[in-house]
Amino acid sequence: MTTNLILVLVVLTNLKLLGSSRLGASIRMVALQGMVLGLLPVLAHLQNLSVHFVLLSLGTIALKGIVFPWLLFRAVREAEVAREIEPYVGYVASLVAGVLALGVSFGMCARLTMPENIASPWLAPVALFSIFAGLFLIVARKRALNQVLGFLVLENGIYTFGVGIVAETPFLVELGVLLDVFVAVFVMGIAVYHINREFDHIETDRLDRLKG
Amino acid sequence: MNAISFIPLLLALVLSPLLFGVINRTKAFFAGRHGQPLLQLYFDLWKLLRKGAVYSRTTTWIFRAGPVLGLAAALVAAALMPLGNFPALIAFPADFLLFAGLLGLMRFCTVVAALDTGSSFEGMGASREVFFSALAEPALFIALVTLARQAGQLSLSTMFGPLSDAHWLDSGPVLALVIIALMIVLLAENARIPVDDPNTHLELTMIHEVMVLDHSGPDFAFILYSTGLKLWLFAALIVGMVVPPTDSVWLDLLLATGGVFVIAVIVGVIESIMARLRLVVVPQLLVGAGVLAAMAFLLELTLKIHNPS
Amino acid sequence: MRYEAILWLLILVPALTGGLTLQLSSARAVLRALCVGVGITVALGWYVAGEVLMSGPVSAGAEWLYLDALSAYNLAVMLLIYGLCSAYAAVYFGVELREGRLTLRQARQFASLWCGALAAMTLVFISNNLGIMWVGIEATTLLTGFLICVHVTRESLEAMWKYILICSVGVAFAFMGTLLVGASTHGLGLRAPEVLLWTRLHAHAALLNPVWLKAAFVFLLVGYGTKAGLAPMHNWLPDAHSQAPAPVSALFSGFMLNTALYCVMRYVPLVEAGTGNTGWGLRLLIGFGLFSILVAAAFIVFQHDLKRLLAYHSVEHIGIITLGVGLGGLGTFAALFHTLNHSLCKTLAFFAAGRLGQTFGTHDMHRLSGAMRVAPAWGMGLFGSLLALIGVAPFALFMSELQILKAAMDGKAILALVLFLFGAGVVFVGALGHAIPLAWGKAGPVTRPDRVGILESLLVVVPLGLLLGLGLWMPGPMQTALNAAADIIRHTGSALASSSGGAVQ
């Protein structure tokens, strides 16, 4: 039941991200999503709880709920981004696209046979939906920081899938993955800083000198 | 059609003007005022019914027919809505489609009467009203369909019966999402904040008020009454989902009626703490409601596939 | 026992070298340390690879590290390219140092990231755990991102951003695919640490769940394909390759794309066995390969920047390799052979492009003309490599492409054959149209006279010589090695596999 609640929260945060324009609110939404998902390993494996899952939960919550927002807010401050800009796809259209993506995810996952001890039937569709939503954000938003948020949502979707369905991934791999995501966000933050310093903006649609 | 199915209709007819009184009193409470008497709308209706009506020379029979038709539609819709565990006067499978259609007819009558006056203010209000309703309708339909699927029943009178505590435990998120979507639709369809401000005096910011600007006397009374009835019906729809069935039917009825008034209080609270949204943002809110309803529907579909119970 | 230790050293040495270069206080010392560190790694790697290719797989670390014929071959090729590129980097940046265009900070950044990337790529090859393999690929993406903008300009920043974002998304997809492969082992009763071990999966391949496996392969192909430069996910390639300094471009084209393709190759036998040997996965590979060839051909005709031209050539050749793997049989053998040929050729081409760019001060092909007259050594290098790239006989690339054509005919894939020939033909005409003015056109304005030392001449002669030699004759041990590597991809337990893999004489 709580797993269901978490998954619904995840979908709601995704939808809010799709429909929202303010950067600060978006970063907080992604942080909330990350923290909520951090609870998933513990809840999905309540029967065979082990130190491994608890550590993973704590690590994820710390990383996604505290470290990433801190890095991103720092990047926002450096970039001094104040204005909202029109994205490629308007917010209403993004919301509708989000619902369509949700429908497609449910449809696609209806064809897959799930393992019997899965914590909730909504796990795979919600994971797939997060992946779609993240991709959509990367493609449809112009500001580089919004694209980084889209990447984080994409990773969240993959993480949901991994934790909920593939219970047997080795601990080391999960750690490696978390570390990679951390470094990726770190690297992207630095990249945004450089871009802003060189260009005075972080709108990627104006990065168009290399063509053909 | 037995005697007890008249009770929901009767309660709706008698108590709906009281809703506005409750809303106004709540707003006054938040503002630190004493506020209007609770029965103010009854007095207003009585006063208006005894007055004469003034008709502009540019209007035709449509203008005169609008309020009457609207009231008729509202009354029939009231006959479709159950309350507590009492079935409605008219009940058949898929009657919720007729319900939505009658509400649409009511809106159509108001809009057409407004356009008939030839005034630009009314025209502007009419276009806004229709635009927002077009966005809110899908939310309403999807929410009702989800509800029907959840309960496994196709009639309004039987839809709320099966919803028990077990349902809430199982598919709590789905029902919660439907309720939020319906609440937003209620605010939109009844021209409350954050979609429309019923207290504004500026015609350029009005949506619903400006459409009924030229009605007077009994026509205006009909319109006020049918607006109150519409609010009651939406509130009854939401209450039906929330109030759990108890052992005694009369207790159910009492709880349901109380629930309707609680919703009125909630509307009053929302009106007091929020400001009206900018007109360009309202479509986002309504599409958001539609999206929430669609999400509830999709979640519902998967639930049924996995636990066919 | 000592081989296990060497496997660990293969990762440690580059990592330590990278750390060391951050401490050194002169750019020249940094470059020298780089060469030494890479040299040691190359020697160790070839030693262990030779051992594996002669006597069989080596494993260490409770089977988490594993080197079989396929990974040994790829490791050997990668180390060859890395060695060549490091030598070239010393030359290229030596020129920049002489003119004071390279600061100590940039040199340290370059060297540490270069060594780190080597460590990460080695990790990809020697790991048996598919998850760790993924970690290695993601690490290469992040580490090489900043290699692109060693010199910070607007274009290089744009290229770096596109590269990091697109490849991170692609690699995230690849991780999803890895997870799905893990999910397909449900019911096999594998213990948690073993689920992603390739050797285990290979042993039980026929028992994996086909639906999950198919979904996994789609994600993997799209994900790793983004990193490899398969169309339509190749958009980052031309920008990254053209804006990075020449040694980095050479490395990207010469080896990083192949590393990503190696990851796809690892999954091919699993998918084939799991889906009942219907060739479903192979058809996907053929489709992507052909699409890449055609897209690259279209863009090659309209290029005017030399390094972008070479980048699109990379897309085309990656498409050819993918096509070869998809065709199976002789095609797999040819595809692996082609990885060596393409890597050698592309690195030489980028070496030449880089030095010529330094000589002429630009990469614009309209101004970079008459290279043979102005800079004979590198001009010959460039022209020779361009000829080899478009498949002129008797260079080795011609041989491997011919073998792929034969594989297509053997497998009756007539449409693939026709499309491949069409694409190759367009590339031939287009690139030759660019190459001839490059070599013999009116000599363009030169900003820096060309002084070519022994090392540079060697850097031109050795790859060209190898390409020529391999085209004419393939040594026996190499043929055995290639066959052993190809067998790993082809071996799915069906009669279709293990068909002849001899070289065309």
Image: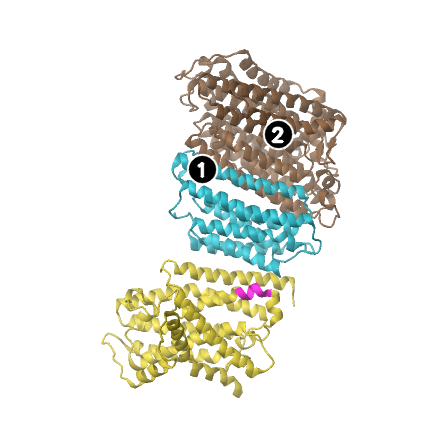
Chain colours: A cyan, B yellow, C brown
Nearer to us in this view, C418 or B79:
B79
Residue C322 visible in image: no
Counting from the top left corner in percent of width and height, residue A163 is at 64, 50
Read off the residue under disc 2: C119
Q: Label 1 neighbourhood size at 10 Å, few (<14), some (14-19), many (20+)?
A: many
Read off the residue under disc 1: A193
Counting from the top left corner in percent of width and height, residue B280 is at 36, 58
Q: Residue furthest bottom?
A: B3
User: What is the chain identity of the residue bearing mark 1?
Assistant: A
What residue range appears in magenta?
Answer: B171-176
Nearer to us in this view, B88 or B193:
B193
Q: Are marks 1 and 2 in contact (CB under 8 Å)?
A: no
Nearer to us in this view, B18 or B304:
B18
Counting from the top left corner in percent of width and height, residue B269 is at 42, 69
Q: Residue at x 61, y 45 (%)?
A: C176
Callout 1 amino acid: Tyr
Nearer to us in this view, A193 or A120:
A193
The part of the image, by quadrant, that contains residue B121 is bottom left
Cα separation, mark 1 vs mark 2, equals: 27 Å
For the residue labelled by badge 2, is the local secondary structure a helix, a strand or a loop?
helix
